[in-house]
């Protein structure tokens, strides 16, 4: 059994914990922006292929304490690196730190690289080289105060890079956050799903993959573990085949719209690359023209946050948004994410749920509004405490 850690975004830890339990991982425990777990190689491969809310899957291999570069160098050299890397292989090091002893992550990465290649040079007379794009071994160094944690990154590039989004509109939501936002609603992958400001289509595509039970990284070109010395292609192919077998036809009606033709064009191209184009319908229309398909359902909105606009202007738009929701989306659960808390109050309805999330560096609130007959008469403004 291998001890692993899956990294995620703030607010998605419980979702990731549940995903890992469903995969069959053991010793699953949520932490801040991470979930630790245990499993064999098949669980590692499955986690990378199928987790919707994970950014990367790490395998911790060593922990030590260092208060200066000399102790850091010696600590890294305590690891037998030829267990993980061939002498003519390639490596890349990513460092994150929060420490009074070390202030520059790039310098720490260089020092750790020196310790590794010096070990190979002393032992074999040759040394591995650095490849930042597609290394044979991707190494994560995390320093908190004087504690140094070393882990192997089995994912390689971040798992939010599914491979379908080569073009995007301004300020897109990343794929992991998009999947998490949908999963936080409790949506079962059936019925109406609508996105009236679809941008580059990330939320629509993630919803389509959930509806089909499609692994989000099924078409990813490469995982980090594929160049590891212990990579087992047979196990990986078996995991992949099982995941494909468990896919299902979509029972959802997934539709989106946007006010710009460019956004619709990008959405269609991204959906083609994600292999879900046949499961999504998109149209060019302004939000004021949006109307929910009959029968109720789920709508998620990522509106402009308007950080640089006057509160009157962005507030008027959020009020309009609330009016359209009440008029045209009866029977819908409407979820809105925004970093603009004052503007969110202008929607004119009290949210039934409020979840803190981060969109990039922006601290946001993710609000649920239940729209039903009579909402117009029972509207009330959210108070400062409620937000």
Image (cartoon, grey):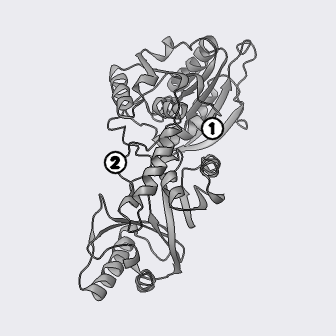
Residue at point 45%, 15% (across, down): 286
Position of residue 265 measured from the top left corner of the image (x, y, whole percent): 33, 24
Which numbered disc covers residue 184? 1
Residue at image position (52%, 32%) is: 212
Mark 2–mark 1 Cα distance, whole angstroms, equals 28 Å
Element carrying mark 1: helix
Tell me where residue 31 sits by quadrant.
bottom right
Residue mark closest to the camera, 2 vs 1: 2
Label 2 residue SS: loop
Q: Which mark is residue 295?
A: none
- Residue, disc 2: 221
In the rendered image, the residue lying farthest to the bottom is 122
Q: Nearer the viewer, residue 304 or 185?
A: 185
Q: Residue 341, position in %: x, y?
A: 60, 35
Local packing at callout 1 (Cα closer than 10 Å; few below 14, some 14-19, many 20+) is some
Q: Looking at the image, which residue is at 27% across and 74% down?
A: 128
- Indicate the quadrant where residue 376 lies: top right
- Classify 10 Å Cα crowding around label 2: few (below 14), some (14-19), many (20 and above): few
- From what the image shows, is residue 145 above or below residue 194? below
Q: Is residue 25 visible?
A: yes
| Contact between labelled residues 1 and 2, with CB atoms less than 8 Å apart | no
Percent x, y of residue 264 = 37, 22
On screen, residue 29 versus residue 70, left or right, reads right
Q: Quadrant of residue 192?
A: top right
Residue at figure coordinates x 72%, y 19% from the top left: 379
Q: Is residue 14 above or below residue 370?
A: below
Tell me the quadrant of the picture where the C terminus can be found: top right
Identify the mark nearer the N-term, 2 or 1. Answer: 1
């Amino acid at each position: 059994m291998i001890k692993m850690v899956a990294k995620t975004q703030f607010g998605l830890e419980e979702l990731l914990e549940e995903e890992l339990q469903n995969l069959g991982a053991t010793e699953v425990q949520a932490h801040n922006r991470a979930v630790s777990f245990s499993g064999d190689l098949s669980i590692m491969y499955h986690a990378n292929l199928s987790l919707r809310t994970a950014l990367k899957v790490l395998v911790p291999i060593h922990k030590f304490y260092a208060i200066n570069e000399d102790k850091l160098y010696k600590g890294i050299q305590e690891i037998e690196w030829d267990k993980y890397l061939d002498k003519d292989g390639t490596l890349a090091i990513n460092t994150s730190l929060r420490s009074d002893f070390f202030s520059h992550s790039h310098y720490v990465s260089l020092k750790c690289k020196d310790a590794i290649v010096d070990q190979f040079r002393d032992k074999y007379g040759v040394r591995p080289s650095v490849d930042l794009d597609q290394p044979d071994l991707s190494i994560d160094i995390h320093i908190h105060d004087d504690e140094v944690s070393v882990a192997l990154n089995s994912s390689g590039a971040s798992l939010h890079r599914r491979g379908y989004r080569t073009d995007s509109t301004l300020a897109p939501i990343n794929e992991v956050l998009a999947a998490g936002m949908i999963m936080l609603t409790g949506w079962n992958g059936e019925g109406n799903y609508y996105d009236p400001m679809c941008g580059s289509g990330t939320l629509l595509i993630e919803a389509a993959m959930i509806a089909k039970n499609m692994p989000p990284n099924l078409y990813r070109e490469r995982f980090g573990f594929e160049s590891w010395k212990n990579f087992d292609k047979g196990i990986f192919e078996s995991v992949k085949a099982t995941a494909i077998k468990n896919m299902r036809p979509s029972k959802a009606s997934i539709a989106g719209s946007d006010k710009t033709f460019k956004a619709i064009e990008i959405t269609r191209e991204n959906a083609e690359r994600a292999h879900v184009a046949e499961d999504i319908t998109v149209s060019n229309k302004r939000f004021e023209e949006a109307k929910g398909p009959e029968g109720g359902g789920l709508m998620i909105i990522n509106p402009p946050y308007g950080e640089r606009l006057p509160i009157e202007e962005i507030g008027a738009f959020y009020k309009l948004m609330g009016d359209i929701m009440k008029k045209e989306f009866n029977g819908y659960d409407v979820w809105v994410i925004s970093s603009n808390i004052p503007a969110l109050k202008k929607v004119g309805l009290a949210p039934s749920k409020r979840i803190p999330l981060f969109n990039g560096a922006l601290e946001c609130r993710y609000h649920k509004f239940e729209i039903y007959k009579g909402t117009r008469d029972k509207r009330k403004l959210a108070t400062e405490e409620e937000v």
